Amino acid sequence: VLASFSLDIASSVVDFWLGIGLAKLYLAVTRRQDASFGILFSGGDRFFATLGGTILFVLGTIGLTLLLIIPGIIFMLWAWPYYYLIIDRQCHVFPSFSVAIPMGRLNWFNSILLSVISFGIAILGLLALVIGFVFAAPFIGVMLATAYVMMKGETPHVATTPKNTGTPLTTPML
């Protein structure tokens, strides 16, 4: 029992550490930066801050949901960017919440829409014999990172079309 418990804890720590690296990878993809495989293993520098933020987020969500269901949902919709703020901006735990909640409050409808769409994509991925979730999970991750980047005021880089080197089109004057 002790060995099983130890392996469960170790597995959870590794999963959490890789999750931080995965979030960094999603942010790099969103910003069209170098997205190498090594980013996946670069979550160690933000591990304890992200763990502390996650514990506060879970406690806040559970506590507010136990009081009344609606405050817990509102807290989740307003505070979810804390995770990316800690990872992206090297914020500490409490400043990440003090920035995330006003950011989430300003974008509450987008957060609701993002949650509903993410849930729908995840369900469709699971219904596709669970194989679809292999494609749905990274798509949802990039979608959340893109939403965070846009909520922060950045413009995610989009693919541009090559410049036309031909003569400009002229329209007839009427």
Image (tube, rainbow, N blue to C red):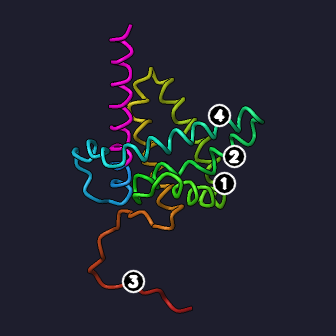
Residue depicted at x 53% and y 52%: 81
- Amino acid type shown at disc 1: Trp
Q: Is residue 15 above or below residue 166?
A: above
* Residue 8 rendering spot, x and y as whole percentages: 38, 19
Q: Identify the element where label 3 is drawn.
A: loop
Q: Identify the element where label 4 is drawn.
A: helix
Q: Identify the element where label 1 is drawn.
A: helix
Whether tag 2 and tag 4 are in contact, CB under 8 A, the answer is no
Residue picked out by circle 3: 169
First along the sequence among labels 1 and 2: 2
- Amino acid type shown at disc 3: Leu
Q: Identify the element where label 2 is drawn.
A: helix
Q: Quadrant of residue 158?
A: bottom left
Q: Residue furthest top?
A: 1
Q: Is residue 104 above or below residue 118?
A: below
Residue 132's tag is: none
Q: Nearer the viewer, mark 1 or mark 3?
A: 1
Residue picked out by circle 2: 74
Whether tag 1 and tag 2 are in contact, CB under 8 A, the answer is yes
CA–CA distance in space, label 1 to label 2: 8 Å
Q: Is residue 123 above or below residue 95?
A: above
